[in-house]
Image (spheres, rainbow, N blue to C red):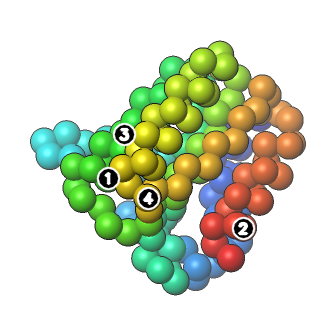
Amino acid sequence: MESAELKEFILKTISEYGTKVSDPGGTKTREFPLRVDPHKFYADFAFRISSNKSWLFVEDDEGQSATSNASKYWYWIKTNKIAEAVHLVHIIGPSYGSHKRLAQFVSDEARSQFPNFEYHQIVTESWDDPKWMDLFKQEIRSILM
């Protein structure tokens, strides 16, 4: 699966829920800025859940970026004192198992400090394996329903 197809699948899956989610950037595209003055990080995908105003982020990663992406949400929540629930659905593609475990560890630590942080890790050894797509749909459904 090519990168553009992957992004399209993610957007299509989220859009199936219509008014349950909104795009805070108003662009229906990726790269939503997470501001932590004076720094700016970017979320691959960011949405607001209409029913409770919580956040839904989706990251798709491979390798070492999995750990740094998990860390940036903890930093954003802590620095900005985010009170709303934050859901991070983290799809991790082919990489070493250590990166997956580190991302999970960082997210567990964040959750211990911020109980409103929910981390949903989906792991695949191949972007062409449809199992991760089914798991992604299930996670999104469980968050939005």
Using residue 51 as the reference point, say whether residue 43 is left or right of it.
Answer: left
Q: In the image, which is nearer the foreground, mark 4 or mark 3? A: 4
User: Which label belongs to residue 116?
Assistant: none
Residue 10, image x, y percentages:
66, 53
Residue 28, image x, y percentages:
50, 62
Can residue 132 be spotted in the picture?
A: yes
Q: Earlier in the sequence, mark 2 or mark 3?
A: 3
Q: Earlier in the sequence, mark 2 or mark 4?
A: 4
Q: Which residue is mark 1?
A: 77
The one nearer the camera, 129 or 78, is 78
Q: Give me the C-alpha separation between circle 4 and circle 3.
A: 17 Å
Look at the numbered discs 4 and 3 and tell me whether their residues touch, using CB distance below 8 Å. Answer: no
Most extreme residue toward the front, as rendered? 112
| Label 2 environment density (alpha carbons within 10 Å; few <14, some 14–19, many ≥20) | some
| Label 1 environment density (alpha carbons within 10 Å; few <14, some 14–19, many ≥20) | many
Q: Which residue is mark 2?
A: 141
| Residue 36 drawn above or below residue 11 | above
Q: Which residue is mark 4?
A: 115
Please tell me in which quadrant of the rendered image residue 62 appears: top right
Using residue 111 as the reference point, say whether residue 129 is left or right of it.
Answer: right
Q: Residue at x 47, y 80 (%)?
A: 52
User: Which label belongs to residue 72?
Assistant: 3
Q: In the image, which is nearer the foreground, mark 2 or mark 4? A: 4
| Residue 93 drawn above or below residue 45 | above
Q: Secondary structure at mark 3?
A: helix
The one nearer the camera, 42 or 76, is 76
Q: Secondary structure at mark 2?
A: helix
